[in-house]
Amino acid sequence: MAQKFKSSEDLKCNVQIFWKPEISLDKTIPLTPYIYMDFHAKYMTISDLQARAKKRLPHFTWEFLHSGTGDDGSVDRNRSALDRVGFYPSILHGEVAPNLRTEFLGQSYDLPFGVAPVGHSGLFWPGAEAILAQSALTAGVPYSLSTVATMTPEEVGSLTGNRGWFQLYPPRDEEIRRDLLARAKGSGFETLILTVDVPVASRRERQVRGGLTQPPRVTPRIFWQCLRTPSWSLRRAQAGMPHMKTLDKYSGDFESRDPTAHIGYLLRTAPGWDYLHWLRDHWQGPLIVKGVLNPKDAPKLEAAGVDALWVSNHGGRQFAGAPGTADALAQIRKASSLPLIYDGAIEGGLDIIRAYALGADFVMMGRAWHYALTALGPEGPKHLTEILQRDLVSNLGQLGAQHPKDLRGKHLFF
Ligand SMILES: Cc1cc2nc3c(=O)[nH]c(=O)nc-3n(C[C@H](O)[C@H](O)[C@H](O)COP(=O)(O)O)c2cc1C
């Protein structure tokens, strides 16, 4: 679809000039130039968006978004586990009209994928959480807000159509925990995600090498990187430095301390089973546990009253020794009948189909949305949605299926 010209920077894109006739009152027909960009000609894939995002972000910010941890072993395994999944094309199946509508946890979504929680989203583009929540609502897909987002549940909840997903990094203090759940619920988040794969901070060596300091500081190196990405830096200067706004309310006596240590205190990132049971008792609505990789954990989570498991290795950011998520998904599918969410290294419609074929009931993406937003601004998420939609339809056509879920266990080769 053609997009309207937005800024001088976009001139670098594939710009097409059309001459649009305008009928004026005196019946002459002047020709006015209209400039349109065909994003689909220039950015056909997520990797195209990724390449442009990389150019537009200062190096430290790019490393924050793109890196895993350690030697990026589990980032690589996410990709290779998906690449191993192939399909025998279907023949002579007649015409099949794709239908991407997807039922999940009592909701009906227009498409089989959504937006995973990403902390500090606003670092990549000011107001990222609001833009992504609105784009998700328009596309009819779920949006997840992180506890460590740069916008609050109160600011974002209504933009999700009051059916958002709120991701919880578990507060240590019970009063704060209750308050955060009440804020999420009261702001229109109906699904709670408990992330359990951050028992300790990971080292994220690439981020440190890229110049990120804890607490964040503008060093001469960071300043130099910012000079080389003026559009990002100007936007940043206008919007101010992003921070974990949801937690402001609980800053109290800690304001003067190192903010990282403060967050570490506030959010007890290694909850136990007792914590999960407490959450189940105090959250009326779907409860998802995110960061499950071991099939042996599945029955116990099911017994704890969890509604769905989110099979994820946090995009490879927590533990370089973790399995590729697609491998874990296939094993967990055998061990559990609970609804399963897949995430990790999704680069197109074929990957979404692979995840469903291995047993997923829904697919979420983290980085891809932020590549799209950084590359193309607020139009980016819509463009990404269209890319995935087209890609799904094209690949489903090869397999004679209406929806990726119809392919569970079918046509596969490894
Ligand atoms: C920059 C960044 C920040 C993230 N922040 C969070 C977070 O706050 N909470 C969370 O549960 N997961 C977080 N994740 C993990 C994502 O929710 C998701 O599991 C991961 O991005 C999926 O892999 P993908 O990026 O390859 O799609 C983050 C991921 C990235 C890339």
Image (cartoon, helix red, strand yellow):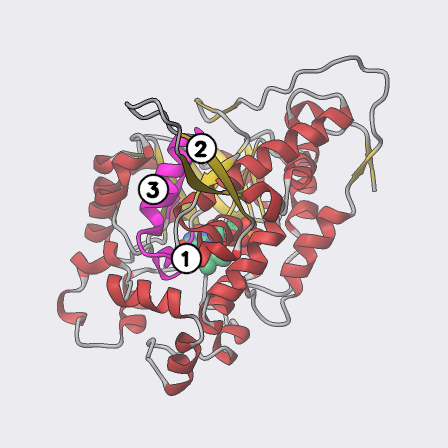
Q: Position of residue 313 (x, y in %)?
A: 57, 54
Amino acid tagged 1: Ser
- Horizontally, is 327 left or right of 125 in the view? right
Amino acid tagged 2: Lys
In this view, the residue farthest toward the left is: 253
Q: Residue at horizontal 49%, vertical 66%?
A: 62
In the drawing, what numbered circle is on residue 292?
A: none
Secondary element at tag 1: helix
Amino acid tagged 3: Leu
Q: Which residue is mark 2?
A: 20
Q: Residue at horizontal 26%, vertical 76%?
A: 258
Picture layout, residue 135 above or below residue 54: above
Picture layout, residue 387 above or below residue 79: above
* Callout 2 touching callout 3 (CB < 8 Å): no
Image quadrant where one finds the C terminus: top right
Q: Position of residue 298 (x, y in %)?
A: 57, 40
In the drawing, what numbered circle is on residue 8?
A: 1
Q: Earlier in the sequence, mark 3 or mark 1?
A: 1
Between 216 and 21, the one lying in front of the other is: 21
Answer with the quarter of the image where residue 163 lies: top left
Distance from Cα at disc 2 to Cα at disc 1: 21 Å
Secondary element at tag 3: helix
Q: Position of residue 176 (x, y in %)?
A: 21, 52
Secondary element at tag 2: strand
Q: Is mark 1 within 8 Å of ligand 1?
A: no
In the drawing, what numbered circle is on residue 279?
A: 3
Magenta span:
118-145
In this view, the residue farthest toward the top is: 94
Between 337 and 247, the one lying in front of the other is: 247
Q: In front: mark 2 or mark 3?
A: 2
Answer with the quarter of the image where residue 332 lies: top right
